[in-house]
């Protein structure tokens, strides 16, 4: 019913580069944004620990995401 994808299709090197740039940017933002949010909340609430929780949580999330992204995909037929 649907169109079958061409198994011999190879994306261009530029397309692959943009795909990896997007992945790297996502991981970098996952590391930094929670810490910045924690810093903002620390200033708002007068605390000093949320920035640390933000950076630790963000780095943990980014590392997990990086491992998931780079996991080898199973080959078709196996």
Image: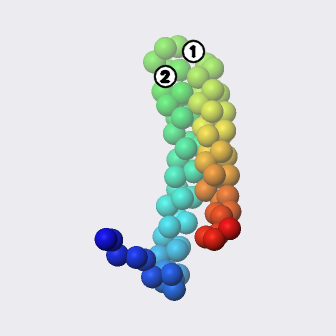
Closer to the N terminus: mark 1 or mark 2? 2
Residue 59 placement, left or right of 20? right
Quadrant showing the C terminus: bottom right
Describe residue 72's horizontal placement relative to residue 9 as left or right: right
Q: Which residue is mark 2?
A: 41
When the figure is inspected, residue 6 is found, relative to residue 25, above or below; the finding is: below
Neighbor class of circle 2 (other Cα within 10 Å; few <14, some 14-19, many 20+) is some
Which residue in the protein does label 1 denote?
Answer: 47
Instruction: Report the residue that reaches farthest toward the top.
Output: 46
| Residue 59 image point, x, y percent | 65, 40
Which residue shows up at 49% across the image and 31% down it? 37
The residue shown at (49%, 22%) is: 41
Q: Is residue 15 above or below residue 68?
A: below
User: How far across and how far down the image is residue 25, in percent?
Assistant: 52, 56
Percent coordinates x, y for residue 61 in the rendering = 61, 40
* Residue furthest out toward the left: 1
């Amino acid at each position: 019913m649907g169109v079958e994808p061409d198994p011999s299709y190879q994306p261009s090197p530029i397309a692959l580069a943009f795909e990896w740039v997007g992945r790297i940017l996502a991981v970098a933002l996952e590391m930094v944004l929670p810490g910045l949010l924690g810093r903002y909340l620390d200033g708002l609430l007068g605390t000093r620990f949320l920035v640390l929780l933000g950076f630790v949580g963000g780095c943990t999330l980014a590392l997990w995401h990086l491992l998931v992204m780079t996991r080898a995909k199973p080959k078709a037929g196996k």
